[in-house]
Image (cartoon, rainbow, N blue to C red):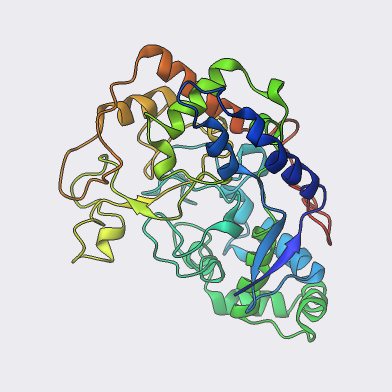
């Protein structure tokens, strides 16, 4: 069960999309485009778990913690080091940087729309819920390098944080669970802004180009991309072997060794802001979107664990170009540099 915070300004667009989509029938050659568009209407509420309900004070505390290097051992890093608002809430690197200047094993996932990520989180699903994610980077020696008990001690010694915890939780006591709850509350407010695609879904036919519309058809039809990248956030929140990883890079299979289907399987990432990133896949091994499309067109490594969605597509050059044109419509219009109070306290608007 979850509680939901209403997103103002979206309900009207939603109703417009639902009312108008019937008029789009026949615009795609196969006649399916109208039905497909219904699957991408933006939600009107943000889901929050009943075990960690939303409050403005808790969100503000989480925001402060997110940007504060007080949670790193030497004060050199914060959550925002790897999740920058101006870089689509990732870091713009192929792989995350260690505090010593090296590379971690994995690509930094974006935090966009994390409120809608049901089920396990992380590339391999090692985190059961969002509230259990923060302690890993905070305590990791190669990352923020601060033991959680030391983080609690630091925050407890800071009067402004005691006041913040009191406002958020009713008393000034700092604990690991409260620290994680505040960060998770803030992170659930990190929502992809409206993109040209959203205006098109809302009924504005000129919001995206004709090639992008054809790319939408490829995405949902011949390409089969929507089989994994589904819904308004473009992810099924599941794990798939897409035919890239090799050797001991088992992904979910490391945690589920008896499951054939989960060997080399990694979490499906959102495609929001996809053209704002500089590398792709769980390990940042694919440098461009063009190369990503080529990979899926070829079908990747054929093996028992490979997802049934992954197979040679035989896309034409135009179909690939149209698909890329469509993906470009998923990025927010306007300024992405939101390093202060990112969302209003009571009514965040995507």
The residue furthest left is 303
Q: Position of residue 320 (x, y in %)?
A: 41, 19
Whether 172 is drawn above or below 63: the answer is below
Q: Is residue 299 left or right of residue 130?
A: left
Q: In this view, does 111 lie to the left or right of 186?
A: left
Number of numbered discs visible in the structure rendering: 0
Q: Is residue 294 left or right of residue 112?
A: left
- Is residue 68 visible in the rendered image? The answer is no
Image point 40% across, 28% down: which residue? 287
The residue furthest top is 317
- Is residue 61 visible in the rendered image? The answer is yes
Image point 75% across, 31% down: which residue? 334
Whether 49 is drawn above or below 350: the answer is below
Q: Position of residue 74 (x, y in %)?
A: 59, 61
Taking depth in this image into account, of 218 and 246 the one nearest to the observer is: 218
Taking depth in this image into account, of 171 and 333 the one nearest to the observer is: 333
Q: Which quadrant would residue 95 be assigned to in this image?
A: top left
Q: Position of residue 77 (x, y in %)?
A: 60, 54
Image point 26% across, 57% down: which residue? 262
Taking depth in this image into account, of 270 and 309 the one nearest to the observer is: 309
Image point 38% across, 36% down: which residue? 224
Image quadrant where one finds the N terminus: bottom right
Taking depth in this image into account, of 72 and 258 the one nearest to the observer is: 258
Q: Is residue 37 left or right of residue 291?
A: right
Q: Position of residue 284 (x, y in %)?
A: 39, 38
């Amino acid at each position: 069960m979850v509680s939901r915070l209403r997103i103002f300004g979206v309900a009207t667009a939603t109703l417009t999309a639902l009312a108008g989509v019937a008029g789009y029938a026949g615009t795609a050659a196969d006649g399916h485009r109208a039905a497909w568009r219904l699957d991408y209407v933006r939600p009107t509420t943000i889901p929050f778990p009943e075990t960690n309900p939303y409050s403005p004070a808790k969100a503000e505390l989480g925001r402060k913690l997110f940007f504060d290097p007080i949670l790193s051992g030497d004060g050199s890093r914060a959550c925002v080091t790897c999740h920058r608002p101006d870089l689509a809430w990732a870091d713009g690197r192929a792989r995350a940087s260690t505090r010593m200047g090296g590379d971690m094993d994995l690509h930094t996932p974006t935090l966009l729309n994390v409120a809608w990520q049901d089920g396990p989180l992380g590339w391999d699903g090692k985190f059961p819920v969002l509230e259990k994610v923060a302690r890993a980077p905070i305590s990791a020696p190669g990352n923020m390098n601060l033991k959680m008990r030391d983080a609690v001690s630091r925050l407890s010694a800071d009067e402004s944080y005691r006041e913040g915890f009191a406002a958020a939780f009713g008393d000034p006591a700092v604990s690991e669970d409260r620290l994680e709850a505040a960060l998770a509350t803030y992170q659930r407010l990190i929502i992809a802004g409206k993109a040209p695609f959203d205006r098109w879904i809302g009924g504005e036919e000129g919001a995206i180009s004709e090639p992008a519309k054809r790319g939408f058809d490829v995405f949902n039809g011949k390409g089969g991309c929507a089989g994994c990248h589904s819904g308004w956030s473009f992810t099924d929140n599941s794990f798939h072997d897409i035919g890239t990883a090799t050797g001991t890079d088992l992904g979910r299979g490391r945690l589920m060794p008896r499951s054939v289907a989960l060997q080399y399987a990694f979490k499906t990432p959102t495609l929001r802001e996809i053209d704002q990133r500089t590398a792709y896949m769980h390990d940042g091994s694919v440098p461009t979107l063009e190369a990503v499309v080529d990979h899926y067109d070829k079908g990747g490594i054929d093996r028992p664990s490979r997802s049934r969605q992954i197979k040679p597509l035989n896309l034409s050059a135009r179909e690939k170009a149209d698909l890329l044109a469509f993906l470009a419509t998923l990025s927010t219009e306007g300024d992405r540099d939101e390093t202060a109070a990112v969302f209003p306290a009571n009514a965040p608007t995507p």
